[in-house]
Amino acid sequence: MQLGNLHPLFVHLPIGILVLAFLMELYYYKKPAPKDNGTILFALAIGAFSAIFSVASGWFLGENGGYDEELLFRHRWIAVAFSVGALILFFLKKSANGLAQKTYFPVFVLVLILLTLTGHFGGSLTHGEDFLFKEAYEEPVIEDIAQAVVFSDVIQPILQQKCVSCHNSGKAKGGLLLTSQKELLAGGDSGSLLDSLEKEKTSLLMHRLYLPMADKEHMPPKGKVQLTSEEVLLMNWWMKNENCFDCVVKNLPTDEKLDAILASLEKDNSLKALIAEKVDDVPLEFIAGLSQSNISAQLASEEMPLLFVNFLKRKNLSDEDFDLLKPYKDNIVEINLGYTNLTDELAKRLKQFKHLTKLQLQNTGITNATVQIISNLEFLESLNLYGSELDDSALNSLATLPNLKNLYVWQTKMTKDGLSEFQKENETIMVQSRVADSVFASSTLSPPTIIADQEIFKDSVKISIEQYFEGAKVFYITENSKNDTIAKEYTEPFYLKETSTLKTYSTLDNWEPSLTSTAHFLKNQVEINNITLAQSPHPKYTAKGGETLMDLKRGTTNFVDGNWVGYESQHMTATVEFKEQTTISNISVGSLSIPTSWIFFPVGYTVWGSADGNSFKKIKTIKLPKPTPSIDIERMAYNISFDPISLKKVKLFVESPLKNPDWHIAPGGNSFIFLDELVFN
Amino acid sequence: MSEKKIIADNAINMNRRSFLGKSALGVGGMALGSLLGCNFYQKEGSLITKADNPMGIKGILNSPHHPAKIKRVIYLFQSGGPSQLELFDYKPLLNQRRGEDLPESIRNGQRLTGMTSGQDKFPLVGSNFGFQQHGKNGTWISDLLPYTAKMVDELCIVKSMYTEAINHDPAVTFFQTGSQQPGRPSIGSWLSYGLGSENENLPSFTVLLSRGTGRPNGQPLYTRLWGNGFLHSLHQGVQFRAAKDPVLYLNDPKGISKETKRSILDNLAVLNEKQYKEFGDEEIQSRIAQYEMAYRMQTSVPEVMNTENEPDYIYKMYGADAKIPGTYAANCLLARRLAEQDVRFIQLYHMGWDQHDNLPSAIEKQAKDVDQASAALVADLKQRGMLEDTLVVWGGEFGRTNYSQGLLTDTNYGRDHHPRCFTMWMAGGGIKPGFVYGETDEFGYNIVDNPVHVHDFQATLLHLLGIDHERLTYKYQGRRFRLTDVEGHLVKDILA
């Protein structure tokens, strides 16, 4: 609630106004009163009103949380009592009643006491409980953690932050003081703090820290700011090493975890931290103003008033844009000018940003002329020149940059030799050019796509082949009874006139040739009168019944596309009647396998033929192996061949595996067969 | 709705939403705002639209809590639960003891999914694919990932990830929102809320989807995974599709000119502004901003999606699939292009890792889908100087079991979901490169060293962006919510 944010402003009004009113009362107490002009009454009214408003706004602020609960409780309710008192005071002053006039002064004193208490607890909330009586303690600055004294540099700051607010000379809870070595050794009412306890294997100090939060003896008590797990580890480490008061960090044994924690205590000596110490704060209005001009500026953090500036690939930069940055040029540590219209002329303006640690100039028009300006940026750590016009002669100037760590030079005019020499002389700089070609040398081309209107055709079918890559060569092979298997280069669409298997792949310089993609095309010249199905398919997958098997449309890998007839745990028997008696020697049966959808290829076929349309004679029986483990979605046109025979009708039995195989995720479940086109030749 | 009811609703809305806010402002607090030096009149999460702020969405934070190591994240989410045992976590013991039952001392009462809890045996199975050592530190990487192996010196591999969720949807939701229950904002939405957008022409949170070849009919994903939850809808992820309209409903209908569109939007904005003044509902401002963003995206999106000018050697890096829109490789290339446009959070999802059966053949294809393009993305960012301020994350929602689900044969097996340990990798700014963190036991079942929980990962990701995960909160229904809920510890050991 935003009202809460007004609290810090308003709280000071009742304090000032009421104290002033009291002083005025004192001033006029003995003096022969001039005509009472109501000034004091007015002051009391404003005081009471501002007190009530302060309480209201404070209420919301308190709701935001993050305060010591006990203190907040006291502050809040004493403040309520105070506002009520202030209001009563106003009415007492206003009233002509004798009793009211008698009680006026005592009540005023009481209100002032309440005011003092409220103010004190409020101050404790924001500035810390011990702010009034705090003994001067200056937190140590650790330049080199290895040389730091464990107690005074590591442990004492923790005690100061988390314990001393209660265990100080002003408060001394439990008779314990934690402000110095002497007092720590002395212990408190519960005895020695540092000696090992008899029952526990640890000292009283650690015992209290380790107790669960719910335990009354846990320290710091519930509701107070707790030690972090890292701080507890540090305390334990110090205690374990016989709570040595003079030891230096490097002389005590540590482990990896402790090392990391200790390292984090060291003063931030990064370039950015050093720069941040030197510069002023940046007002948010400045940043907002830049954004009006399409310049993005980001503050580094709450503590570091440093700016990261991004020109957002603008193509209309001018001197004025750099002028806008001038007021806080020393705060700017990163500038991204990538993909802008930056020229050498404009780049001269970079001179003013002497604190730059990172500069991105990728894909701009700058040339060697700008390198002089860059080479003066003593704090520069990262420099991106990718896609700019700089050449080898710029490298000498860059070598003088004392802090440079990352240098990006891909697609500049710098030569391989020039760069490798530069790298040799400047081992600490990571010089990044194009990632070595060898890493991605074995990239494989994607296979071409075969495009045709149909897979089953009467006379011929037009084939075209597509490949995404420009310049790639496409080769194809048509395998059929007439052609041999020599690959031809594809140049334009062609026609297939026979039942064929078409294979195609592509090649391109510097690429591995693609895998082969394959498609089957079936020629069909036998005209079918009708197909009847002995068993009706699964009600969901009937498509158009027998018609589906003769409409010359092949089903896709989507089994609900309406071109598949599906049977659940059931075989299929179809009777086919030709328009006229025809000599046939081959039947192709289309089927589908999607193991994850419980669909498998058939495991057997039996063909009967009839020349007169009534009596059938068995022609061929085929048994196939059970499906092998796979999850591939596959379509198949299975060819059943036999000696040529003249027939009017054919009866075809397709055997289903009925149940899912053992290896399947649901072994023994009802499996499906899905069938489409029957093609006779 | 009767007229009376509308008026009554209006009155209720007036009371509930506006009364306090308006009376507070009535005191004259607005003017005092600048005196106090804080933007108290900008409500939590309030959105400043084009008119006030040409930079697009403004974040709630004026600055990161601490200096950020990275500016953007590309999260390559491997949906379905990739098997760590086939890809990163080399466990020769499982090959030696192939077929033996998983010892109870190792399983230790771990709950299993309904898919294998009925199995009477849990036969151990090692990877059917070889492992080799790669890079300066001799890191073990599977032969399934030859390109990733070449980039191993850039990667920080965390082998000790764990989660509580055991099924896909709760597990993915947990990773994306910090809660297994749907309804909380996704990571990208939190970032948009916290840091805002740098590019005014693109959303700060974009999403790209691809289907794997390993299990093409795998688990679906839901748009709520990139939803804004209780944050303003302006912060939701915007999905870019591989189709004629990459972003749905963006283009003008036939017969509507650019000028007409502009005038429609301007007039609509006036009406919405009026409505906003009356009701004070910030979703109305969201809506105005969304219309404006959509208008600008009409030109910015086609620019980003048009990869025609990418040179051939870039395709050679990402692989030939990158030419085919909608593939993982094409999405990786787009991710780099979006990153170049200062999009803050780019989320890819690649489906198909849920290999309960026929794992060997499925994972071979699936790994091929992602290996080259993921490695290429890291390499490409590096050569452009972007890896130092970008974080690339690769990982799924959980791992897979060390025992076979279903029949174990010489060549074939499956693996069930396993939340107790799995592997992720990260690369980029602020992360130790060429580093392996955490360890699992010989059986690849339990973590023995340095466990990293999902919330720890989220806390670390936010930390790299300069955000203290405990301090980026949003108050909703009386509670302050945050991405890491009530947990999450920074994984300091992997920070550079």
Image (cartoon, helix red, strand yellow):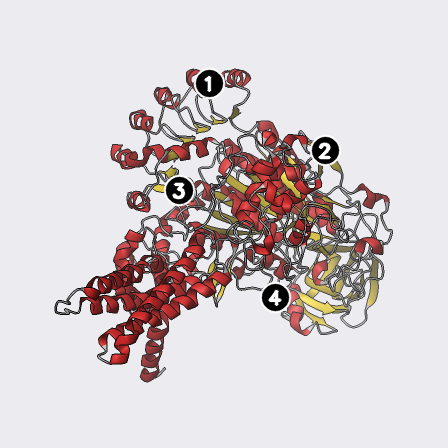
Residue A351: image quadrant is top left
Q: Nearer the viewer, mark 1 or mark 2?
A: 1
Q: Residues within 10 Å of mark 4 (few under 14, many from 20)?
A: some
Q: Which residue is mark 1?
A: A399
Both labels 2 and 4 in a single chain: no
Q: Which residue is mark 2?
A: B133
Three-letter code, disc 2: Gln
A670 is higher (above) or lower (below) than A260: below
On residue B31, the disc is none
Mark 3–mark 1 Cα distance, whole angstroms, equals: 30 Å
Three-letter code, disc 3: Leu
Q: Are marks 1 and 2 in contact (CB under 8 Å)?
A: no
Mark 2–mark 4 Cα distance, whole angstroms, equals: 51 Å
Q: Which residue is mark 4?
A: A562
Q: Which residue is mark 3?
A: A299
Residue B60, position as x, y percentages in the image: 41, 53
Three-letter code, disc 1: Ala
